[in-house]
Image (tube, rainbow, N blue to C red):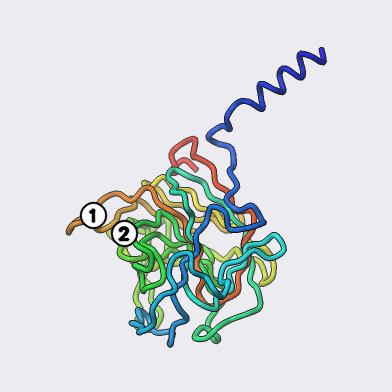
Amino acid sequence: MKAVLISSLCLMLSQPLLASEWRSLFNGKDLTGWQPYVSYQPETNAHNLISKQQPQGLNNDPNRIFSVVDGLLRVSGAEWGGLTSVDEFENFHLQLEVKWGKQKWYPRLEAPMDSGLLYFAVGPQGAQSGHWMRSHEFQIQQGDHGDYHSLDGVIIDVHATDTHIGDWKFYKYDPKAPLRKNIADRVLKLGLHEKPAGEWDLLEVITDGKTLIHKVNGHEVFRGFNSRQPIAGGFAPLTRGKLQIQSEGAETFFRNIRVRSLTKPAAEY
């Protein structure tokens, strides 16, 4: 009997992981699997600021904007940029936990704490505002976890109504609203499911490109459709790309970053 059990265990250990099993993307020791891209600390908080500063660039992070502290991924926020995955991903379910630190940096001293998770990130570093890659953004911001942002012109279709802040007009997700097509803007999430500052929030992205789902602490807050990007005067499907974690003026901590392949269409989750 013992020989049979040992033989069975050896067989199990020798088999590859199933597609649905989780893969850790952060080892809690160093930034293996990731590359820092650091741009600069902006002079103002103006939208689409054109700065005279030159970016630090890829794998050049002298001020340790991205580091590992006590087993956690720390993003200082002092300079803007993104920690970019070496690997690309498609048809995936991504989970990570996030909480705020205490430090904020000019020019975001009076603004809410801010970061972001970018996915299907493609093309050159800094394509969006000199800081981030072309991508879809899962907004990580106080009171706004799960909002959607289009970076560098990517587009989606989404059930949404019109809304605005001042002169800035954009959209609010509403699954009962008509389907709006060709959206390359901010879309506010549905509901507020964040925990108090200092506590860990669980964030999830489930996507196969045809459907894009954002979840906060187990609650679906956004669902978009038909990921596309501008190419040669038209648009092409965007269904594969890197991940990027933003540095945007606030100290932020991450842990338990993991991903698994989808076993069914994202629309069925």
Q: Is residue 107 left or right of residue 160?
A: right
Secondary structure type for disc 1: strand
Determine the residue positioned at 58% across, 43% down: 23
Q: On the image, numbered disc 1 is attached to which residue?
A: 235
Q: Is residue 46 left or right of residue 105?
A: left
Q: Which mark is residue 155?
A: 2
For badge 2, the amino acid type reads: Ile
Q: Is residue 236 above or below residue 182?
A: above
Q: Residues within 10 Å of mark 2 (few under 14, many from 20)?
A: many
Mark 2 touches mark 1? (CB < 8 Å) = yes
The x and y percentages for residue 61 are 52, 70
Q: Residues within 10 Å of mark 1 (few under 14, many from 20)?
A: some
Query: Is 161 or 227 nearer to us in this picture?
Result: 227
**Residue 190 in view, yes or no:** no
The picture quadrant where one finds residue 16 is: top right
Label 2 vs label 1: CA separation? 9 Å
Determine the residue positioned at 50% across, 74% down: 248
For badge 1, the amino acid type reads: Phe
The disc, 2 or 1, on the residue closer to the chain's N-terminal end is 2
**Quadrant of the frame with the N terminus:** top right
The x and y percentages for residue 109 are 55, 86
The x and y percentages for residue 161 are 37, 66
Secondary structure type for disc 2: strand
